[in-house]
Amino acid sequence: MVTSPSPDSPTPASRRLSAARALWRVLAGRAARFAAGAHQTWRRSLQLRVVTITLVASSLLVGGFAYLIADKLTNILLENAETDVLLRLQNGSDYASKQFNLYSQPQEAQLQDTIDGTVNYLAGGDPAQTSGVVVAITADSFAGFIEPRTSPDVQVRPLISPELRASVAAGNVAHQVRTGTLDGERTKYLVYGSPVPTRFGQLELYYLVPLTRQDATAADARATVVATGVALVLLLGLLAALVTRLVVTPVRVAARTAQRLSAGLLDQRMVVNGEDDLALLAASFNQMATNLQRQILRLEEMSRLQRRFTSDVSHELRTPLTTVRMAADLIFAERDEFDPAVARSAELLQAELDRFEELLTDLLEISRFDAGFAMLDSEPTDLVPVVHRVTERLAGLAERVGVAIELDLPESPVIAEVDPRRVERVLRNLVGNAVEHGEAKPVRITLGVDQSAVAITVRDHGVGLKPGEEKLVFNRFWRADPSRARQTGGTGLGLSISLEDARLHGGWLEAWGAPGQGAQFRLTLPARAGDRLTTSPLRLVPADATLPFGGPRSGGPLAIGPGSDVGALAIGPAEPGDRAEVAP
């Protein structure tokens, strides 16, 4: 029984086509990688660009000169050969005319012998001469009486074109350069023809001069010129490489030294050799590095002293604050028995002590971050109840200022390995600021999650942030507008502490704002402690945001995130699952 192949089974032709396509894709991929590597090398290497440009320019210049020289030399050799053949042709024509004028009829018996002798004489007297010059006398008009003669005895008609014969028959001296085979060897010939007048009519005298020697001389000259040109180009390339290396090497050393300086190795310096411009550059660079090192060390010492002062003052104030708090609590508890003015003073004292204690707590937390003593106590936490707790704690403040808090939370639990105390503090700061500056408009809290990260956005519709304020919003003690009416008093450290909390988790805290459109803050944390973030489940720029250039999310909103003491400046709208482009 014979079985036919299934219609779905691949045929040999289709398999070969698939293999060819796969091979083509592999080759195309390798070519693309090679091109990308070459392009990257071209962009990075100044020496390669200088040497390549020098080689290309010198090759074009030397090639042009070589072509002109070789062409001029070939023309000179050909002109010399033409001059020599023309002189021999004139003399030969005169000699032949004298010999043939002895005869008045082409039928005379001695004419053919005279023609043979004349051809041999003009060829050098030896029919077996080896100079390569062929002499021929023809007389087509006397075909029945005179036979053509050549010396040496070879067939020359293929080298004498009909156009040349016609021009000579018309009484002109003409020439051509022809390539043909004589005596089994293919050679280029310079063919000259001249009429020979006689008493009985006109004969034709031809000189066929081989150009072998001239071609060999021209080829040798071209080879010499090409070799000289190649040597000159290579010498120029080597010279360019050496000169460029002398200039590029100190620049590379300066670049590497600058990289080490930027990495914190402040004792790096360049070696100064000589007194030229490069030595001046190295000396100036070293002086700049010394000044920078001195300034950085001074600033570090000032910062260390400032942090120590803040930490010491914060700890020292704890004891008197505790004593004052105890006394204030007693007074506040008995305020109903005092005069109204004294009772009001007790209430003010209690409120200001609360603010002072909050400031002191924030200062202590900042000092722990500065000293590197902050510890992360991560545990699997459901963030939905955390958001609800923050909302409930700030409900009274929101009611007083007339701001509605809207929640957009998933129905299922959102579990992440975080420190719940720190996350709650971050959300409390973000939501508190949004409520405070919300201009009695709703504040929306959104919680999103994907496989690798969780994100929380806090959106208000207040006055927003002015251009440039996104760079300052996480600075310590910074306020967007000190003259703004505020029902609550903050320390100016909340967002700074929140940024440090986000960094401690390995997360991002970013901000977007536009005048008149409010602001939005986005907290992104890894779902598992220790993972590295690459994307965020929520967009940074709100979907309803418009920019001065028109259109939703057009233009370049700004975001503050990790990367420096005040965060990194991110430009461009952030879409779901996309990380904003960060410029340090």
Image: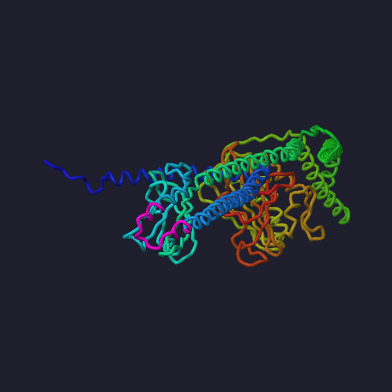
Nearer to me, 349 or 332: 349
Which quadrant of the rendered structure holds the N terminus?
top left
The structure residue drawn at horizontal position 75% and vertical position 56%, both measured from the top left corner, is: 469
Q: Can residue 296 be seen at all in this image of the molecule?
A: no
* Above or below for 548 versus 270: below
**188 to the left or right of 330:** left
Q: Can residue 206 be seen at all in this image of the molecule?
A: yes
**119 to the left or right of 417:** left
Nearer to me, 453 or 23: 23
The structure residue drawn at horizontal position 88% and vertical position 55%, both measured from the top left corner, is: 339
Nearer to me, 63 or 242: 63
* Above or below for 77 versus 200: above
Q: Position of residue 483 (x, y in %)?
A: 82, 60
**21 to the left or right of 224:** left
Q: Was residue 107 drawn as part of the magenta stretch in this picture? A: yes
Q: Position of residue 100 (x, y in %)?
A: 44, 58
